Every structure is written in C-alpha cells, then in structure tokens.
Amino acid sequence: MKRRTLLIASGIFLGIALIAGLVVLSYVQRLMAPKPLTITYLTEQTIMPAGAACAGGSDKSPGVAKEILNLETKDIYIAGGANPMPDAVWADYRFWLPYMKNSTRHLLFNGSCFFRSPDAPADCTGDACFSFATIVDYSWLKLTTIAGNSCFPDASGCSGDQVNPGYVSINTIAKCQRVVFEGPVIYELADGKGNRYVMHATATGVPDVTGPTLPAGWTLTERTIDEPLVLLPFGGGDNCYYNVVRDNLVQSYHQYAYASDQYPE
C-alpha cells in the first residue's frame, strides 16, 4: 500500500512539475515573441524644442550603453538618475524576467541628448520630461519604447538579439534623442533603394565593414563627412520614431534617410 501511495504521489508531483514547466516555457515564449509593427509615421524629422534639457545635464555620448529591457512592456531603460548602476556592478549583474540586459554596446557617436522620455508630453518642461523607475535598487531613465519588430528579408532570420547571416533586424522605437556624429568617418549601411543607416554601436568597439553578411543588394561602406551628421527622430509634430537596424555581428545602425515619405510604405 505504501509503495502504491508513493508511486501515486510521485506521479502527481511529476505532473505538477510538467505543468509548471510548460507554464514557464509559455511565459518565456510570450515575452520573447516579436511585437508586430502596427503604426505608420511620416519620415520627416521631429524638431527638438528650443531650450530642451538633456537627461543628465550633458550632451556627451556615455561611451558604453547600460540598458535593460522590460520584456512585458517593451520599455527600455538606461542607467541614470540619482542612483545609477555602477559599471563594476553592471558587468556581472544578472537580471531576472521580465527584465533582461540589452546587449552591451560601444557607442560610435560623439553627442547625445535625450530630451524627453517617450511617455512624456511633447510640451513638457524640466524634470517632467523624464520618467524614472527604481529597478533592483538602482535608478533608471525610461529611454525607449519598442513600437514593433521586423526582420529582412523574412522573419526566420532573427531571434531576439541574434541575427542570422544574410539578414538584418529592424526595430522601430519611440525615442526622443538627438545624436551627433562629428566624423570625419562614418559607417553607412544602405539597402540600394534609398534607405540609409549610420552605424552607432558595435559589440567590440571596432566597426567591421567587411565582416557582416548582408541581405542581397545591401552595402556597408566607410564614408568621410565634411560636417557633423546630426540625427533627430522622425514622425513630425509630437512623434519621436527611429528605425534601428542590427546586422549579424551585433552592429547597430540608426536610419537617417528614407526612400519614402511614410514608413512602412
């Protein structure tokens, strides 16, 4: 009798464990699933308000981006505020779901101004332009909200941060940021149809022009500029949208020229 009771109890335990495992797997798959793009926006630049403040009081590039993604809300936060996570803590810190680290990236631009969080009203002033959250006892600035994800030439080549050779991922984000490339060299990605992108970050700190395997018709070239390249978000009016492209070497690019006056076409 005891043996039969033990077997029944073991079976019940295994069944509960299996159900719990399936629930966790379903939760993780839901969090990691790409978000379809349901918006369209005009591809005209959004004007940064005169006198707008830069988050942190500086327009210098931070050098290394310390960002975390809330997979449930699709919001991205950057270390900032009164108690940002120090570099030494960031290096080995492990976040738990629904939070995860954005891939650590070395930034290539020289100037950066986050002039408001994506959920702040366009007519905000001062501190009201920035949303902060306390996560794992540190302060974080809400930087970005992901509006949608896509993969070119088809959806099979992208999974989270991973992009297969021959593909690029395209994340459309709400991000109110001015970005300045002083040059004299930039790294320009182009799709051959009039859409152009400038490399803004790498995983290694060293741009690789020949290493990426790009979709057919796409090119990556080193280009010299005679004056600073200043990027502002797109959408016009109150909108702040960027397309951020990533290649199979985890090099990231901001789109700054569009082939059409609306995205998606």
Image (cartoon, rainbow, N blue to C red):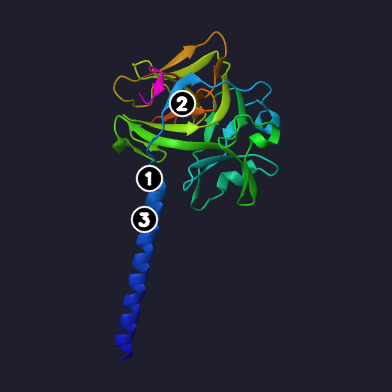
Q: CA distance from mark 1 to mark 2?
A: 22 Å
Q: Which residues are magenta?
A: 259-265
First of labels 3, 1 by sequence position: 3
Mark nearest the camera among 3 and 2 is: 3
Q: Which mark is residue 33?
A: 1
Q: CA distance from mark 3 to mark 2?
A: 32 Å
Q: Is residue 189 left or right of residue 240?
A: left
Q: Amino acid at mark 3?
A: Ser
Q: Amino acid at mark 1?
A: Ala
Query: Magenta span: helix, strand or loop, mainly?
Result: loop
First of labels 1, 2 by sequence position: 1
Q: CA distance from mark 3 to mark 1?
A: 10 Å
Q: Residue 85: x and y, percent?
A: 64, 44
Please name the residue that numbered disc 3 is placed on. 26
Seen at 47% across and 37% down, the residue is 146
Seen at 70% across and 42% down, the residue is 82
Corner quadrant of residue 211 = top left
First of labels 3, 2 by sequence position: 3
Label 1 CA crowd tier, 10 Å (few <14, some 14–19, many 20+): few
Q: Is residue 1 left or right of residue 201?
A: left
Q: Amino acid at mark 2?
A: Tyr
Please name the residue that numbered disc 2 is placed on. 253
Residue 62 in sight from this viewpoint: no
